[in-house]
Amino acid sequence: MIDTDTLRAKARGALDRCGVKDYDGDALSARSPVTGEDLFGIGGSGDVERAVAQARAAFLQWRATPAPVRGHLVKRLGELIHEHREDLADLVSIEAGKIRSEALGEVQEMIDVCEFALGLSRQLYGRTMPSERPGHRLMETWHPLGVVGVISAFNFPVAVWSWNTAIALTCGDTVVWKPSEQTPLTALACSALLDRAVAETGAPAGLHQLLLGGPEVGERLVDSPDVALISATGSTRMGRAVGPRVAARFGRSILELGGNNAAVVTASADLDLTVNAVVFAAAGTAGQRCTTMRRLIVHEDVADELIDRIAAAYRRLPVGDPFDGKTLVGPLINEAAHGRMRASLSQAAAEGGELLAGGERELVPDAPGAFYVRPALVRMPAQSTIVKEETFAPILYALTYSDLDEAIALHNDVPQGLSSAIFTRDQREAERFLSSDGSDCGIVNVNAGTSGAEIGGAFGGEKETGGGRESGSDAWRSYMRRSTSTVSYSEHLVLAQDVSFL
Ligand code: UN1
């Protein structure tokens, strides 16, 4: 088991190489879930008014910079992230507890979205549409929106920032970032790399501001009238507080909140593929992705076999130090997360659930302050109260069904609507799940798990997940304002709808 001194030295080395300076202080404490111990104190910068004012000043310059020129900034950022990918992955493992491959995967998402944003910088397409009036042209143009406030969570400490920041900067916006208090080091590193890209490409200084601090800092950002858009990732509880506050001042928000993602496994499914996909989606990242698979809705003909095979895989999963190359499941973020996992497992038992594998804490002598758990598989008699809740820990509830309509009804009968999957070899079943009366989620996969989306698609979900879309496809439109313009080249005044006047 790696020790805290080694983690500390790795963290300091990575920060230095990424160009982070003068970070020691006592505003908040960097901590690693790997050993559960504090690393060192760091200085905060929680002056929201100052950060927003600087970002606003930079916006006035940045919005007038041609979009393809703005693209040079995200191109350089992607190169710097690529150069420092090992350092950034180390910091992600140190602060979020991710295994190497997943930490590198998260860093890869940053590089990917920078590449996407570079291409986008020449494709912020407006439309022209035929005018009903002779001698007139009708068109739409997309303009930069303003300052974007990004509030991100511990579990994807860098990827979610990059989805928002690379797109927002390309769209001509400037960014104020409030990362999770659990992950200040990854934030300092990303911020330093972006500052370097800004300096090297001649972009306005101040276009990216980092705020380190507690929830009160996030609240002041949310309420700031000069922040045009708040993009917030976190719990539904957080979104319920943020959404109405931003709406009350007529600001815009993109909310990416809780998921309660399920897979429907039909009788024709390829079970080998299904077992692998389910185990990654449900147990990977120690169940701490918003896209983690939390429910399995299996056809009764294959339920026993599939559930047995998943239980067997769960018993064998290497849980432990994420710096050990053999580990597949790292730690939970903290003791509170473990407490919530225990409470949900007790409630599941009270609701008639049978724990088939996992659930127990591991590595207590090696890392007494850390919270390692074996992912839990619980067979439930029905989709009871606890199954409808998101517990941010590796618990997979298994339910059975006998016909597809019933499975889809169960699937959709939860408050959340982020990601979903069907495992089937029957095209009719797959198409039904993808159709308008199939899955009600923002992400709907066939023979692929619920987690691990590529950045090229729009990412987000419906219902209590918040409705926002980030990252690829046309999610950029939320970061811009649309102007609709009519240009007359007629010598006469021609009114729409054939109105005559004068
Ligand atoms: C999250 O958990 O907040 O699709 C984001 C995935 C990742 C992103 C997850 N690309 O699982």
Image (tube, helix red, strand yellow):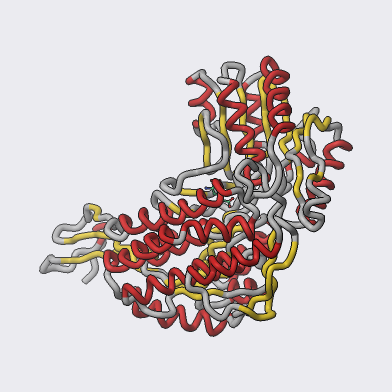
266 lies above or below 57: above
Q: Is residue 98 left or right of residue 119?
A: right
Quadrant of the rendering where the C terminus is positioned: bottom left
Total numbered labels placed on residues in the image: 0
Q: Residue furthest right?
A: 350
Q: Nearer the viewer, residue 330 or 131?
A: 330
Q: Nearer the viewer, residue 454 or 422?
A: 454
Q: Is residue 311 left or right of residue 84?
A: right
Residue at the spot 49% in from the left edge and 66% down from the top edge: 190
Q: Position of residue 109 (x, y in %)?
A: 47, 52
90 lies above or below 203: above
Q: Position of residue 373 (x, y in %)?
A: 76, 44
Res. 124 visible in picture: yes
Q: Position of residue 333 (x, y in %)?
A: 71, 55
Residue at the spot 56% in from the left edge and 77% down from the top edge: 224
Residue at the spot 52% in from the left edge and 60% down from the top edge: 88
Q: Nearer the viewer, residue 494 or 315?
A: 315
Q: Residue furthest left?
A: 491
Q: Is residue 469 left or right of residue 141?
A: right
Q: Position of residue 491 (x, y in %)?
A: 10, 68
Residue at the spot 58% in from the left edge and 32% down from the top edge: 277
366 lies above or below 140: above
